[in-house]
Image (cartoon, rainbow, N blue to C red):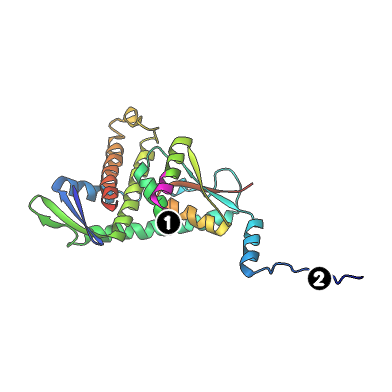
């Protein structure tokens, strides 16, 4: 995977396998359960505040899910080249994609059993392998994009 | 001889000063980010920069606090603003909460 920044735009060059991984990953969105997000840990705050947060997050997830499907179904999205494909994204699209990928990374980590750092492999088995792979791949794409944003 | 007492001149209270005093008296809320072993350090730094508009150095300082101490108090705000920031951080899938400032 190669990302070149040209002014406000980002040019992604993906290999064929990377393109398939990216599509498979994005089709997993959303991964994080809404129940994970709490406004507070221990102190009681008005229930209305938590309700507002839940509503806002639910709306955002629904909108993002629709955007992801539209993004993937755009036939001009992946321009085929000899080595794979090319994708051109604006800065705000990169930001949006980062949020989506991190939802997938965090959600896959939770499905894996929310292991502590470097203990992921201990929970690796046939059932959890796809979550492990999704978490690692989402992290791989995120790192590449964060490097390009520097 | 009786001295004339000069009228005491008190500093004028401007709108801005009133507002500052008011916000000091209002209950404040701390926006806290908790450690999640899954979030990439570069990602957390990036999110702090985006959400709070912080320079990289400040964002990295708070990211390291989260990483090493398990949490970092990011800011103290009114309830409305704190809710806004928590919502923004959760949009990025960071583990953020708000607590009243005792």
Q: Which mark is residue B21?
A: none
Q: Quadrant of residue B60?
A: top left
Q: Which mark is residue B6?
A: 2
Residue A68 or residue A88, whichever sits in front: A88
Q: Position of residue A137 (x, y in %)?
A: 26, 42
Residue B35 visible within the image: no
Q: Position of residue B69 (x, y in %)?
A: 48, 36
SS assignment at label 2: loop
Label 1 is found on which chain of the structure? B
Q: Position of residue B12 (x, y in %)?
A: 69, 69
SS assignment at label 1: loop
**Mark 2, residues whose alpha carbon is within 10 Å: few (<14), some, or many (≥20)?**
few
As displayed, is residue B16 above or below residue A80? below
What is the magenta range?
B52-60
Label 2 is found on which chain of the structure? B
Residue B85 or residue A54, whichever sits in front: B85
Residue denoted by label 1: B53
First in sequence: mark 2 vs mark 1 = 2
Residue at left offset 49%, top offset 52%: B86
Q: Position of residue B49 (x, y in %)?
A: 40, 53
Magenta-span inclusion, residue B4: no
Magenta span: predominant SS is: helix
């Amino acid at each position: 995977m190669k990302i070149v920044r040209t002014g406000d735009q980002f040019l992604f060059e993906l290999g064929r396998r990377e393109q398939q991984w990216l599509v498979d990953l994005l089709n997993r969105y959303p991964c994080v359960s809404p129940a994970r997000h709490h406004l507070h840990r221990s102190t009681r705050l008005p229930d209305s505040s938590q309700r507002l947060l839940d509503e806002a997050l639910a709306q955002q997830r629904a909108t993002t899910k629709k955007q992801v499907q539209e993004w993937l179904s755009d036939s001009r999205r992946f321009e085929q080249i000899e080595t794979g494909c090319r994708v051109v994204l604006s800065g705000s699209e990169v930001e949006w994609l980062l949020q989506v990928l991190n939802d997938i990374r965090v959600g896959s980590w939770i499905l894996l059993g929310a292991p502590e750092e470097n203990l992921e492999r201990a929970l690796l088995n046939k059932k959890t392998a796809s979550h492990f792979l999704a978490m690692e791949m989402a992290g791989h794409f995120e790192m590449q994009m964060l490097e390009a944003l520097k | 001889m009786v001295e004339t007492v000069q009228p005491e001149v008190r500093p004028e209270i401007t709108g801005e000063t009133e507002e500052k005093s008011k916000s000091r008296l209002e209950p404040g809320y701390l926006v806290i980010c908790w450690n999640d072993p899954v979030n990439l350090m570069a990602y957390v730094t990036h999110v702090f920069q985006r959400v709070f508009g912080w320079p990289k150095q400040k964002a990295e300082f708070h990211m390291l606090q989260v990483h090493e101490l398990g949490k970092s108090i990011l800011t103290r705000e009114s309830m409305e603003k704190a809710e806004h920031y928590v919502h923004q951080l959760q949009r990025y899938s960071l583990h953020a909460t708000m607590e009243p400032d005792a």
